[in-house]
Amino acid sequence: MRMNLFFILPVLLTALSSCEKKSPLDGVVDPSKAIIKPDASSSVKVMTYNIYGARGLYNDWELDALADVIKGQDPDFVLLQETDSATVRSKSHFHARDLGERCGMYYAYAVAWERPRNQDGTYGDAILSKYPFVQERDFHLGLSPQNPSTSAEPRSVCAVQCRVGDQLIWVASTHLDHAAEINRVFEADELQTIICDELQGHVIFGGDLNSTPSSAPMQKILTFAQPHYLAETQYTFPSQRKKDNPTSLLDYILTKRSDTKISCSGYKVVQNTASDHCAVVATFSLK
């Protein structure tokens, strides 16, 4: 039976184009901003970084300083907190996209809440990645029904699944409420459902949890998650932007406590003057 090539060729071309992974840098002319190629091994370096709304050293919304901190550590994934999209206070920047372009990485963004009407835009969590995404998911974290604070804010979880070597791995970024511990405990319960039930397989997650290791929210999280800090005095807040030395451990990178196939081979705190939080960097091996 003879095949109609005029029919097959358009179908084939359509199928091939539908499998393309779009880069956040598509259309960027500058060749120096090409996507950074990931290592083919099963080792990953993960950074978590609360970027303080990208205020910059002089409160002038400089993203270059934040990008320099990230590029200086050369992570495979970056968990970002306090990211804006099209807000007045950020001069309409989209932090996840703009940092992705500066660092040559893919980006994903999860909306935690819409800012007040007179400020427009949204606020949430984001992930930068050297690896293209197999899946993207975002989750909403609510506030406790007993929330006592008028300044409390809804939060989010930004999650992406990528293939690293021959392994599939989820990476997730979150930022727990700053205003009331009862909200953080409530969010910790929701986080357990997300990490243990919604995201199947390997998961590396973290962010600014606004909780010290001995606090009630962290004690809840540590029932299902394995921390990798070297000591409880490995403080992450405030950074040199605010003070000479940090005094609290608030930022974490964790894995599922039940996952014995991920091991951490390095964990460090990175001082900087681009944000009020230090960055944290951890290196993991996947078995």
Image: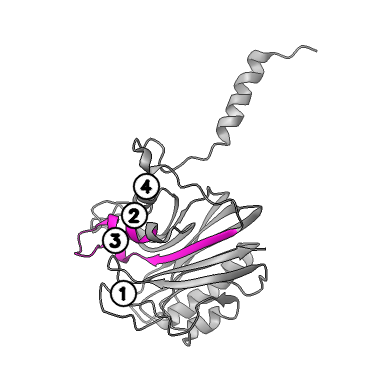
Residue that lies at the very extreme toward the bottom in this rendered image: 214
N-terminal of the pair, mark 1 or mark 2, is 2
Q: Is residue 269 left or right of residue 253?
A: left
Observer-nearest residue: 264 or 192? 264
- Amino acid carrying label 1: it is Ser
Q: Is residue 144 left or right of residue 190?
A: left
Callout in the foreground (1, 2): 1
The answer for how far apart the CA atoms under marks 4 and 2 are is 10 Å
The answer for how far apart the CA atoms under marks 4 and 3 are is 15 Å
Quadrant (top left/top right/bottom left/bottom right) for the C terminus:
bottom right
- Residue 50 highlighted magenta (yes or no): yes
Residue 182 visible? The answer is: yes
The answer for how far apart the CA atoms under marks 3 and 2 are is 8 Å
Q: Judging from the image, what secondary structure is the residue with disc 3 in?
A: helix
The label number, if any, that marks residue 101 in the structure image? 4
Q: Which residue is mark 2?
A: 95
Is 103 above or below relative to 32?
A: below
